[in-house]
Image (tube, helix red, strand yellow):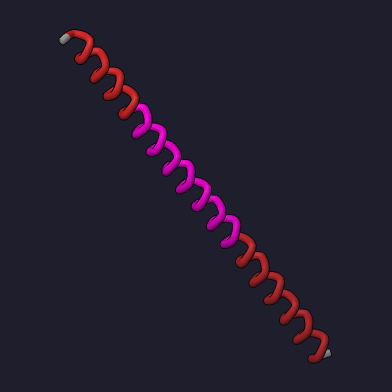
Amino acid sequence: MGFMEDAKKNIAEAAENTADAIKDGVDRAKDKAEEMSAEADVKKAEAERDAVKARNDVKEAARD
C-alpha cells in the first residue's frame, strides 16, 4: 500500500504544480494584455494631442 499512497501523493503534487503554473501563465497573459492596452491608450492620447496642436497651428496661421 505504501507504493500506491506515494503514487497518489506524487500525482496530487504534480496536479497542484500544474494548476499553479497555469494560473501563473494566465496572470502573466492578463498583465501583458493590460500593459499593451495602456500603451495603446498612451499612443492614442499622443496622436490626439498632435492633431490638436496641428489644428491650432493651422488656425493660428490663418489668423495671421
| Image-based side of 22 in relation to 57, left or right | right
Q: Name the residue nearer the viewer: 15 or 45.
A: 45
Residue 44 in magenta stretch: yes
Q: Which residues are magenta?
A: 24-48
- The answer to whether residue 44 is above or below residue 10 is above
| Image-based side of 44 in relation to 5, left or right | left
Please report the residue visible at 45 percent of the width from the left and 48 percent of the height from the top: 35
The outermost residue toward the top is 63
- The answer to whether residue 42 is above or below residue 56 is below
Please report the residue visible at 61 percent of the width from the left and 66 percent of the height from the top: 20
Q: Position of residue 8 (x, y in %)?
A: 78, 79
Q: Position of residue 51 (x, y in %)?
A: 34, 25
Quarter where residue 17 is shown:
bottom right
| Image-based side of 29 in relation to 6, left or right | left
- The answer to whether residue 42 is above or below residue 12 is above
Q: Main secondary structure of the magenta part?
A: helix
Residue 34 in magenta stretch: yes
- The answer to whether residue 63 is above or below residue 1 is above
Please report the residue visible at 72 percent of the width from the left and 80 percent of the height from the top: 9
Quarter where residue 44 is shown:
top left
